[in-house]
Amino acid sequence: MLILTIFILLVAMTIHEVSHGLAAHWLGDDTAKRAGRLTLNPLRHIDLFWTVLLPAFLYFTTGGRFMIGMAKPVPVDFSKLRNPRRDMILVALAGPLANLMMAAVLAFFYGISNNVHLLYGIYLNLGLAVFNLIPIPPLDGSRILAGFLPRRWAVSFFSVERFGFLLIILFYTTGFLMPCVRAGMDVLCRLLQVPTLTQWLSR
């Protein structure tokens, strides 16, 4: 089951990042394309901390009950976007929306087959979408929030990005991160008409 989970997570993370790169390319920035990141080869998107250490940390500290992570962020030069503030939001939304679309497709097939294995794909994609929408740099939620902030505030906000992984670990160890992610996933599960993560874990 661990191997299946890792495989699904790699696929979900890869499509998430490629979606960012494609959105940026369509909106005027070809940085990801020139860097060779518009590929579905997961090896091109692996990051030591986000793809390896964070998922392993969550897996072992939750007794194998939860695992989430991120691929290496695709490079985006926001100055090349046609409308930088608006397009930054659109590029940031592309990744989570791709995961939500994958979860919706899997939920459709789950409704037909009731195959439990499909739930793993649904939960991982929903978890990746919700996790990335948290407004902590460098997560996608921070880009979306910054797009609505005055420029001076946005610059100050992004100044904490180098401490982002420490903030995530802090929120996790203080018991704040997981309830937020699970609550968001449960809401989306109800919308998709599949068992919520809370229901699944309580079995």
Image (spheres, helix red, strand yellow):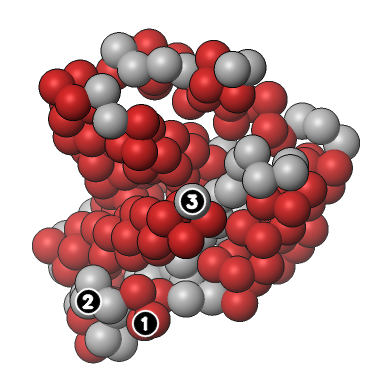
Secondary structure of the residue carrying numbered label 1: helix
Disc 2, disc 1: CB below 8 Å? Answer: yes
Mark yes or no: residue 24 visible.
Answer: no
Q: Quick one: label 3 or label 1, which is nearer the N terminus?
A: 3
Residue 202 lies, with reference to residue 110, above or below; the image says above
- Percent from the top left, x then y, of residue 201? 60, 24
Q: How many residues crowd mark 3 within 10 Å: few (<14), some (14–19), many (20+)?
A: few
Kind of residue sitting beneath label 2: Thr
Q: Distance between the residues labelled 3 and 1?
A: 24 Å
Q: How far apart are marks 2 and 1 (CA)?
A: 8 Å
Would you name the residue on which mark 3 appears?
1
* Labels 3, 2: front one: 3
Would you name the residue on which mark 2 appears?
39
Horizontally, residue 67 falls left or right of residue 77, namely right
Pick whichever, 159 or 63, lies toward us: 63
Mark yes or no: residue 117 visible.
Answer: yes
Residue 52 lies, with reference to residue 5, above or below; the image says below
Would you name the residue on which mark 1 appears?
44
Secondary structure of the residue carrying numbered label 3: loop
- Percent from the top left, x then y, of residue 97? 28, 40
Disc 3, disc 1: CB below 8 Å? Answer: no
Kind of residue sitting beneath label 1: Arg
Residue 150 lies, with reference to residue 39, above or below; the image says above
Pick whichever, 118 or 31, lies toward us: 118
